[in-house]
Amino acid sequence: MAERSDEAFWDQRYRSHPTLWSGSPNSQLVTETEGLPPGSALDAGCGEGSDAIWLAGRGWRVTAVDISGVALQRGITNAESVGAEVAARIEWRHEDLTTWDPGPDRFDLVTSQFLHLPSAPREALFARLAAATAPGGTLLLVGHHPSDMRTTMPRPRAPDLFFTGDEIGAQLDPDDWAVVTNVAASRTATDPEGRAVIIHDTVLRARRRG
């Protein structure tokens, strides 16, 4: 069986659905970037591109990275359907985030939404994402909170895939970073049986000191 981080796993998952995600930007991204002036952004684990397209529509220049070529092609198509101006602001990168390093590039916003890896590769990736954040820039990391495993929502029964804001915030040197948001944000979702369920998103937003 392919690992959840493998390209084959994600390509197959995307192929099994005409559209895997909602097509709307993630709500925590919308909330946490309100008021930020547009600049350069890195969307790590961009999927079908809804966040990258939303940011580009607000003037950001976005580098959108994902392991799945199927997802990226959908993102390209989705961006083109919005318009040439938005599509031109997005660079799509086909990369494995468990090994990819952005190198010397620095971004005014680095965002990763619901990218769940085991703790060791996750910590290494989040360290690289932090390093890719420009001085004065924003790092925004969002994921399913561990408490979701106690709900009826379909979550992997693998505690190591989940994280809290305190856990990932502990990786950031307080001399270099100011934590702006560290919450388990609640929202309502619908489980497979059609029931309304309160779930929580881990949200850590930090500003790199200039």
Image (spheres, grey):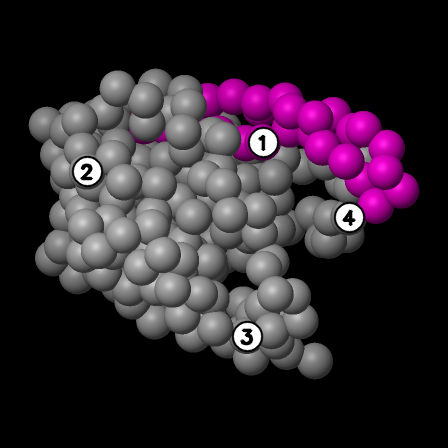
Which residue type carries mark 1?
Asp
Which residue type carries mark 4?
Pro
Which residues are the magenta region? 182-206
Q: Quadrant of the C terminus?
A: top left
Q: Which mark is residue 11?
A: 3
Between tags 3 and 4, which lies in front? 3
Q: Which residue is mark 1?
A: 201
Residue 95 can be seen, yes or no: no
Q: Which residue is mark 4?
A: 154
Tell me the CA gap for discs 3 and 4. 20 Å
Tell me the CA gap for discs 1 and 3. 25 Å
Residue 176 spot, x, y in % from top left? 20, 30
Q: Which residue is mark 2?
A: 59
Which residue type carries mark 2?
Gly
Residue 42 spot, x, y in % from top left? 27, 49
Residue 192 can be seen, yes or no: yes
Tell me the CA gap for discs 2 and 4. 35 Å
Q: Nearer the viewer, residue 83 or 118?
A: 83
Question: Does label 3 or label 4 sit earlier along the sequence?
Answer: 3
Relative to residue 50, is residue 129 drawn left or right?
left
Q: Quadrant of the N terminus?
A: bottom right
> Where 190 sits versus 2, above or below?
above
Look at 47% across and 30% down and name the residue there: 28
Q: Nearer the viewer, residue 203 or 170?
A: 203
Tell me the CA gap for discs 3 and 2. 30 Å
Q: Residue furthest right?
A: 193
- SS for dot 1: strand
